[in-house]
Image (spheres, grey):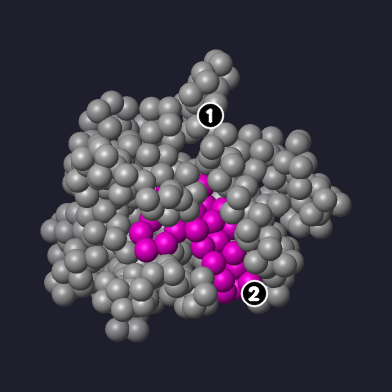
Amino acid sequence: MAESIADSIAPGSVLVINAGSSSLKYQLVDPATERVYADGLAERIGEPTGSSITHEVGGRERIRRVALPDHRAAIAEVVELFREDGIDLAAAQLSAVGHRLVHGGREFHAPILIDDAVLAAIERLSPLAPLHNPPNLVGVEAVTALLPDVPAVGIFDTAFFHDLPDAAATYAIDTEVAQEFGIRRYGFHGTSHQYVSRQAARFLGRPDDEINQIVLHLGNGASASAIRGGRPIDTSMGLTPLEGLVMGTRTGDIDPGIAFHLARVGGKSVDDVDRIYNLRGGLKGLCGENDFRAILDRIEAGDSAAALAYDVYIHRLRHYIGAYLVDLGRVDAIVFTAGVGENAATVRADALAGLEGYGIAVDPARNAERARVSRRISTDDSRTAVLVVPTNEELAIAQQAAEVVLTS
């Protein structure tokens, strides 16, 4: 079977590398037909225990439990899995390797061929996305070393939000300081928000430019966006991926004065505060766990710390949903996506509980169903459609990467 899959890989296919803060998603896909030859997910990278890779080729899935101290080790394991399946990536006539790159600053707002200058710029932007740009760079460098003759294309997470309205993109900070240091709302998960919003419009049978949506990308990293007529008007993440919703290890919104308090009273350095906010915050900071499945299990067992973490998470999520209801005025769809959004029925129900007066009602039976396709979970009489739409950042990245190579 592995040999037949290897032989069937169409010339012009794209290898997609999507390195998250603690994960590595990958996919070998034909961007023209959308056929996926292989895909997988490395999880809990850098965790002392529990790292694993779920790898699927030709409908055959296997899970490899292996220590993954960093993203470079994860990529090495992925390449070995491909080899075991008889797939020689160097001989597969790939048109491109498409890399998800998180922070493009003001410099990058379109897909781009990656060269040394681009790599240097991404590294300079790393302080704005300390959990993401470094593993992104590792992914580019490691795969380029393996496939030096295949063009590497960067697709930036910030691109979709590049043209946010000034009122949404501007922070109330000294204008000269903001200009000098590039301080503004950039937004993240843009590839996912763009893809999912378009899929939602297609599901509803309506053009993008006719509908208003709230998209909730809920994973280890989490973000919300308000999209009017296909264009984002606001999003929860800001200068960095730290702002906004409660996340796996990130605080989300927090009083800026807490940093000063930690420095003055606690003697914490800037790096200390960075680690507290980015690595020791969020769900992990509240209950010691950032795997949502484990948190729900602990709540079921009566764990009060896990229950509080969950309540804080839902409180913040509802806060943003309410804000975007006001921003948009009319909301045609609320869309859940990503790992938690697609799989945690309890989160979806609790996030929208009690909003029937706003024309938003979740059907419990529909919500409880599990499926890997786009689906409606709202009641028939809900004025606002509530949807679950699986994100496919990898396909979106592959299609954009192939287009860049074709037009270069």
Return the residue at label 2.
229
Left or right: 376, with 86 as reference point? right
Q: Report the front residue among 278 and 198.
A: 278
Residue 311 vertical position relative to residue 278 in the rendered view, above or below: above
Q: Residue at 50% of width from left, 58% of height from top?
A: 236
Q: Residue at 58% of width from left, 40% of height from top?
A: 314
Name the residue furthest bottom: 407
- Helix, strand or loop at disc 2? loop
Dot placed on the residue nearer the N-terminal end, 1 or 2: 2
- Which label was assigned to residue 318? none
User: Which image quarter holds the N terminus?
Assistant: top left
Residue 83 shows in this picture: no
Q: Give the extent of the magenta segment.
A: 215-241
- Helix, strand or loop at disc 1? helix
Q: Report the front residue among 55 and 3.
A: 55
Asked whether residue 237 is drawn in magenta, I would say yes
Around disc 2, counting alpha carbons within 10 Å, would you say few (fewer than 14), some (14 to 19), or many (20 or more)? some
Residue 372 position within the rendered picture, expressed as x and y whole percent measured from the top left: 58, 45
Residue 312 vertical position relative to residue 243 in the rendered view, above or below: above
Q: Residue at 52% of width from left, 52% of height from top?
A: 217
Residue 151 figure quarter: bottom left
Residue 308 position within the rendered picture, expressed as x and y whole percent measured from the top left: 53, 29
Asked whether residue 128 is drawn in magenta, I would say no
Residue 367 figure quarter: top right
Q: CA distance from mark 1 to mark 2?
A: 37 Å
Q: Report the front residue among 309 and 39.
A: 309
Return the residue at label 1.
308
